Amino acid sequence: MLLKFETLLIHGGIDGDEHTGAVTVPIYQTSTYALPGIEKHGKYEYSRTGNPTREALEKLIAELEKGYKGFAFSSGMAAISSVLMLFNKGDHIIFNEDIYGGTFRVMKNVFSRFGIQYDFVNVNDKEILKNTLKKNTKAIYIETPTNPLMKTVDVSRIGDFVKSHRLYLIVDNTFMSPYLQRPIELGADIVIHSATKYLGGHSDIVAGLVVVNSEELANKIHFIQNSVGAILGPMDSWLVIKGIKTLALRMERHCDNAEKIYGWLKGQKWVKRVYYPGNYQNLKNKNQMKRYGGMISFEVESYEIVKKIISNLKVITLAESLGGVESLISIPYTMSHASMPDIEKERLGITKNLIRLSVGIEDVEDIIEDLEVD
Ligand SMILES: *Cc1c(COP(=O)(O)O)cnc(C)c1O
């Protein structure tokens, strides 16, 4: 029986425990396993290589993203770094210019030291994309919607481009979750998540996931995961599985609340501009995203207003991160994008007066009241 997506969230991967009938997957808090004999291999031998609780999460995310195989890592950055280790000295990767700050940093300051070449460009511009392509280009790496300006990248269009040039398409799907967007169905080869965000969903874990669309990529990522060892522990794997069970319910509420806040922000005279994926409707595949998600950025008229909003907060928390049940607010200029040069921030539109809101699932009226300025 082919289970529907919302049923898979509850029963996908490994459902419960066949030995005891427990309805949740056991937490196999073990580093090693008794082997059947000197020359006989067991199904599990050592928990870096494989752990049943982690495997339950890995199977689940592969089913949700419609991929061939999933892998769980100790953080989103560990997942991203493990994917970048697929490439060799002399390979070239094209990144979209709006990319998570940590991805930019690890590419620029770590992987470049191993001879991997890169460009950060606007991949939405066909001419720029064509001109950035080199003989040694091996992959295009994107996020959609982007952070913090919520621009969308057309995954199907980039998917066609990578097919015709024999490249890999890597998509960081953290902002949408597989409930709202499934990049492999749109032509991606590798999907990455910071499961710290919507998949975990409760701001209580740091975790990363990778899903690949082929056996060849699965063998390579498994080799890197086992060799480099940035694996997710059994307890945290279990917490991500628990978070995923309510993903559909939470995402619907995040989206409902964000839509209402978007409408309200547009009517405020102290708000200069609102950035929300619903603003961009240029996608080849109109169904790329099921709804617009729970992230909104907005620019206010002055830094005085920014300070006023932040000092009046009662429900929303000023904090890094996103995707939890609680609303979080941040100022990208001095927080997530602090390490980006000022000129670059101004060029992209990340001003001091830009506020990013991760809309939680509280009563939307309480969130709006928290943001009121007059
Ligand atoms: C948070 C985040 C990451 C990094 O994930 P960690 O779990 O913090 O290591 C990567 N990509 C995006 C889009 C993120 O929001």
Image (cartoon, helix red, strand yellow):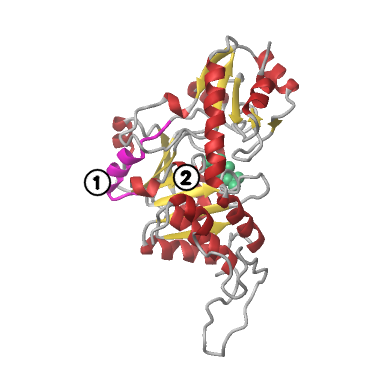
The residue depicted at 30 percent of the width and 45 percent of the height is 162
Disc 2 marks a residue whose amino acid type is: Tyr
Asked whether 91 or 161 is in front, the reply is 161
Residue wearing tag 2: 179
Q: Give the magenta range.
A: 152-168
Asked if residue 162 is among those painted magenta in the image, a careful observer would answer yes
Q: Position of residue 226 (x, y in %)?
A: 53, 66
Q: Disc 1 vs disc 2: Cβ atoms closer than 8 Å?
A: no
Q: Which mark is residue 33?
A: none
Asked whether 152 or 341 is in front, the reply is 152
Which part of the image, by quadrant, shows the N terminus? bottom left
Q: Is residue 69 positioned above or below 195 on the image?
A: below
Asked if residue 204 is among those painted magenta in the image, a careful observer would answer no
Residue wearing tag 1: 164
The residue depicted at 61 percent of the width and 45 percent of the height is 201
Q: Position of residue 95 (x, y in %)?
A: 42, 40
Label 2, residues with CA under 10 Å away: few <14, some 14-19, many ≥20:
many
Which part of the image, by quadrant, shows the C terminus? top right
Q: Is residue 39 positioned above or below 342 on the image?
A: below
Label 1, residues with CA under 10 Å away: few <14, some 14-19, many ≥20:
few
> Which quadrant of the figure has residue 351?
top right
Q: Is residue 104 positioned above or below 18 on the image?
A: above
Q: Earlier in the sequence, mark 1 or mark 2?
A: 1
Mark toward the viewer: 1 or 2? 2
SS at badge 2: helix
- Residue 220 located left or right of residue 314: left
Q: Position of residue 84 (x, y in %)?
A: 47, 52
